[in-house]
Image (tube, rainbow, N blue to C red):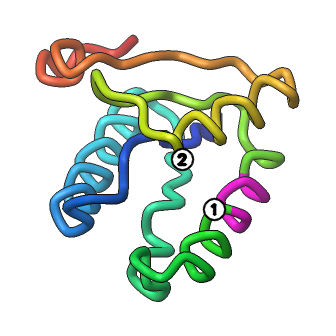
Amino acid sequence: MKKVYICSPLGGDVSANLERAKQYARYVFSCGAAPVVPHFYALVLEDGNPEERQLGMQAGRSLLWLCDELWIFGDHVSAGMREEIRFCQNLGLKIRTITEKQFASGKAP
């Protein structure tokens, strides 16, 4: 099964963004792939603590080595997402963008 790293905002409204990450994971499953969701580190690490946020970002990047693709969700790319995208580009992984409109339609990319 293809492994897809979910790239979407976490900071700001962490609770709402975690809920969105769950919806994105469900979408990836519906596309026949296995979602890799680094956002869930925020359930054990404090995103508002810079050291813990950095630890979560490092752990997330370590998962990219295991993935086949990175899917960018939404119409806004945060600074943390830009780091993940750059890292993914350096690994040569395929990158897809899923806009809010595409996601809302429920259609696979």
- Which residue shows up at 48% across the image and 82% down it? 49
Residue 62 magenta-highlighted = yes
Tag shown at residue 57:
1
Q: Residue furthest right?
A: 91
Which residue range is magenta in the image? 58-63
40 displayed left or right of 82: left
Quadrant position of residue 73 = top left
Residue 6 lies, in percent from the top left, at: 49, 42
The three-letter amino acid code for the residue at tag 1 is Met
- Which residue shows up at 79% across the image and 48% down it? 66
Q: From the image, which quarter does the N terminus lie in? A: top right
Q: From the image, which quarter does the C terminus lie in? A: top left
74 displayed left or right of 95: left
> Vertical placement of 72 versus 81: above or below?
above
- Which residue shows up at 72% across the image and 32% down it? 68
Residue 6 magenta-highlighted = no
Quadrant position of residue 52 = bottom right
> Vertical placement of 41 versus 36: above or below?
below
Tag shown at residue 36:
none
Tag shown at residue 80:
2
Residue 17 lies, in percent from the top left, at: 25, 55
Label 1 element class: helix
The three-letter amino acid code for the residue at tag 2 is Gly
Q: How many marks?
A: 2
Label 2 element class: helix
